[in-house]
Image (cartoon, helix red, strand yellow):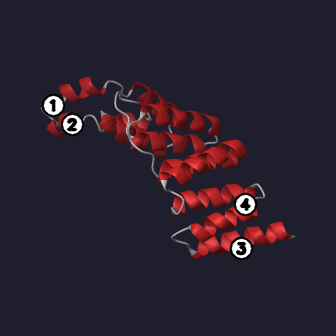
Amino acid sequence: MILQSLNKGKLVVNWPTYCKSHARTFPPLITIRKSMPTLWCWVFTNMNLLSDAQKLFDVMSHRNLVTWSSMVSMYTQHGYNVEALVLFCRFMRSCSEESNEYILASVVRACTQLGSLSHALQVHAFVVKGGFVQDAYVGTSLINFYTKHGYVDEARFIFDGLEVKTSHMDHNYSRVCKTWKK
């Protein structure tokens, strides 16, 4: 039933009932049922089934960092940047877990796509406060934001502070700096 639903892009909505009705066939489902919606939410976001992922997310009783990160990333990837920022604010208010580099990088990308300097500065302050300044994922997103909006000195400052620099990052940064100097 799950694979048929997945192939059709449909959502198996009532997880507790489903798990109880198949307890004899799939005993492990009972023991991990709290993580099943998170797994399926992640699957739906990776299959670009936005409405199904949102429906599942809305009915989930337990949301963890993976669930929140998947949803924020999905919104950002599909251009729903305001929704991504709103969801991140909901995460900050309601989730007991600390944010990580993946959700922060997605939020910075949303700010980049919106062109919102005020939001990006707030997120950047949060990045500094959370200790993610030297993280490559977050740093790359911040560098991308600042260079796309003409703040090359700020981008260079972040680039210089990164723990790990790849040749790809260095090449992109150099290319952008040459463009802005012209």
Which of pointers 4 and 3 lies earlier in the amino acid sequence?
Answer: 4
Q: Secondary structure at mark 4?
A: helix
Q: Is residue 165 rendered to the left or right of residue 9?
A: right
Residue at which label 3 appears: 174
Q: Secondary structure at mark 1?
A: loop
Query: In the figure, 8 relative to 21: above or below?
Result: below
Which of pointers 2 and 1 lies earlier in the amino acid sequence?
Answer: 1
> Are the residues flagged by discs 2 and 1 in contact, CB closer than 8 Å?
yes
* Residue 81: quarter of image: top right
Image mark for residue 29: 2
Q: CA distance from mark 1 to mark 3?
A: 58 Å
Q: Amino acid at mark 1?
A: Ala
Give the image location of residue 137, x and y in percent.
53, 59
Image mark for residue 147: 4
Quarter of the image with the C terminus in it: bottom right
Instruction: Please tell me which residue is depicted at 68% across the width and 49% down the height of the picture.
Output: 112
Q: Amino acid at mark 3?
A: Ser
Instruction: Please tell me which residue is depicted at 74% across the width and 63% down the height of the picture.
Output: 152
Instruction: Please tell me which residue is depicted at 25% across the width and 34% down the height of the picture.
Output: 33
Q: Secondary structure at mark 2?
A: helix
Q: Residues within 10 Å of mark 2 (few under 14, many from 20)?
A: some
Q: Residues within 10 Å of mark 4 (few under 14, many from 20)?
A: many
Q: CA distance from mark 3 to mark 2?
A: 51 Å
Total labels: the figure holds 4
Q: CA distance from mark 4 to mark 2?
A: 47 Å
> Are the residues flagged by discs 4 and 1 in contact, CB closer than 8 Å?
no
Q: Nearer the viewer, mark 4 or mark 1?
A: 4
> Are the residues flagged by discs 4 and 2 in contact, CB closer than 8 Å?
no
Q: Nearer the viewer, residue 67 or 12?
A: 67
Q: Nearer the viewer, mark 1 or mark 3?
A: 3
Residue at which label 1 appears: 23
